[in-house]
Amino acid sequence: MKVIQYILKILFKSRWWLLGISFAAAIVVYVYMSMQPKIYKSDTTIYTGIVSGYDVLSSSNGNQDWMAVNNAIDNLISIVKAESTLENVFLRLLARNLINLDLNKDNEYQTVASSHALAEAISPEIFDLVVVDSEEETFYNLRDFYDSNLTNSLQQMFHWDDRHYSYKALSSVEVGRIGNSDMISISYKNDDQYIVFNTLNLIVEEFIEQYVALRYEQTNEVVGYFESELNVIRAELDEKEKILTSYNTSNQIINFDEQTKQVVERSNEIDVAIEEVSRALTGAENHRKLLEEKMGVATELYKNNADFIEKIHDISSLYSQDSKVMDADEKGRLSGMINAETANLRSITGNISASKHTKEGLSAESMVSDWLNAVLDEAKAKAELEVLMQSKAATKKEVARYSPVGSSLKRQNRDINFSEQNYISNLQSLNEARLRQKNLQLTSATFKTLTPPTIAVTPERTKVKLYTLIAFILAFMLLAIVEIIAELLNQKPYDRLAAEKILKLPVLGALPMNGHREFDDTCEEFALNQLGNSVLNFFDRTKSNNIVNIISLDKEEGKSYIAEGLRDYFEKLDTKPAVVSWNKDFDASSKYYLMSSSIYDFAINEDNAELLSEAAAIIVEYPPVRNVPFPTKLLASAAINIVVVDAERSINGIDHILLRQLREYDKKQNLYVILNGADKDSVGLFTGILPPYTTRHKIRFSMWNLGSTDASFNRG
């Protein structure tokens, strides 16, 4: 509480400086803000369709990916504020305003002031790039010039501080999402309402164009990549298929699996047929040999007969041909020939058998017939076996031919299958990319300006009053802080709080500064009476006399004045006072004074012995402590010790040392400070309000003392 009171007193003391300078700062800010150009604002709302628009990539009943939505909205906002977007806006706005430059009157593109500012800012070489009838051609001319050099005038205009065309001005555009919807609001403000309107229109156009270009560039590149990959894969696939076709043709492959299956089946059938024919051949040979054994020498007649042997060969040849032929007609013809030749053979055999039977009496005709059948069966079996063995050899060649063809076909088919899968995968990716491209067309088409920009009629409300108030408060706070710091560093004990902070001793009272004004005597009388009352409270009524020590740190502090004032006060109370002064009553340089423990050791002489013995109050005035050391034992012998301090002088380092010594030896805690030469408000803290008793003075006094007085301040 004491700290707050101290700070408030500091502020009240410097109130006129604080208020005056703060008001001056507020006036400066008010004038400055009033002189600033008026600001016009325009805004627009764009429906993006990102949240609620139709999306061919997602199901109508699917959950919305809010992270993707928020990311998309953030991307839109970033595109609006991107430097590339604002760079194009700058060039288009400049092209439009250069074409419509009018230095005599306002138009729908800019005011006269803005036209003059633009004419001064543009170099002559830029005017040569203007195509009056075409804003688009002018834009491209400005774009080429802008990109030609990084230090040309257009680059400087965009990257410096032009209030209409610089990146700093254009980047002040405000972009934000409206709630959780898929609409964004864009607003822009500047000092020319027509430039604001055109700038905002260009920002919207360029924003949509940039968004579409960025998205289309991505999808077009993806679509182009997959299309080129498909062309390459398709060419490779066609080439591999051509190679496979040529390979199949050269190797007479129609259906490899079916062909190999037939070869294997035919081989198995031939093996089975060979086994059956071999058994039949063996049976026919055994049967023939058995009959020949029974027939004996007669068989030689048949074997040596030329006609018989020839017919046997003819029949074997026919059997061989019949085994090879597959045509039914041909088989019928051969079967007829075989039957005819067999009949001829039987005829020859019968002739041989009849002749021999007549001459030699051979076996019966039935045995010869059986033998002949066995010979024919053997011939037939041999012919069939020969054909089967030839077929077996041909089948082996087929198997040998198909073995390497199979592995080669598998390898080629595997390569073709891999290419086909790669082609299908890329085709699927291409379809997805085209679907995204179509989806982009749909989403881009949903971009719609719901509330188009308008030309602002009235300027934005300025915050002149707010800034003025802020300037006043900041100036006041800054000055207050400076004043408080200065006061904390100040070593003048001008009032009770400052004195107690600096001197670290309680303040008993204060005497006013004599300004030779009306009521000065009355104020001094009140102050001395308050001081006397306070001193009287420290007297011990049981003692015949009480000692009041008056001390000062330096000369001319006002000790004599206070001593005389206290004597007058005690005289009015019929209390016999006595004043002992170092100037006339004792020698401050004597050893008796320096080594004394009571005033009776040095202050009694012929002139004052009787007075001191009868005095109830002895007021002792000591030399300045700075010049003569004070006998510290005298502190304990006094009823009260008063240190007189000039309220308007700074307390230095030596003073602090002397005060510390006095405090250390103040065992009875009866060391107090009297401020001499204080202002009336500080004195009034002890005495109460001093005259004149005007309303103004009463209010000032109450504010200075924070509504409280302490005219009877007493440490005890």
Image (cartoon, rainbow, N blue to C red):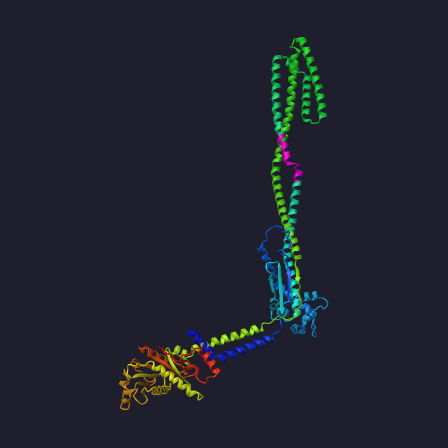
Image label count: 0
Regarding residue 591, the answer to whether it shows in the image is no
- Residue 188 in percent (x, y) is at 62, 67
Residue at horizontal 69 percent and vertical 17 percent from the top? 345
The quadrant in which the N terminus is found is bottom left
The quadrant in which the C terminus is found is bottom left
- Residue 616 in percent (x, y) is at 30, 85
Name the residue nearer the viewer: 430 or 712.
712
Q: Quadrant of residue 172?
A: bottom right
Q: Is residue 248 magenta?
A: yes
- Residue 624 in percent (x, y) is at 34, 85
Q: Furthest-front residue in view?
A: 574
Regarding residue 443, the answer to whether it shows in the image is yes
Whether residue 64 is situated above or below residue 78 in the rendered picture: above
Name the residue nearer the viewer: 563 or 272.
563
- Residue 167 in percent (x, y) is at 61, 67
Whether residue 306 is situated above or below residue 592 in the rendered picture: above
Name the residue nearer the viewer: 576 or 421.
576
Residue at horizontal 64 percent and vertical 32 percent from the top? 262
Whether residue 365 is situated above or below residue 21 in the rendered picture: above
Q: Is residue 44 magenta?
A: no
Q: Which residues are magenta?
A: 246-265
Q: Quadrant of residue 355?
A: top right
Horizontal relation, residue 20 to residue 144: left or right: left
- Helix, strand or loop: magenta stretch: helix
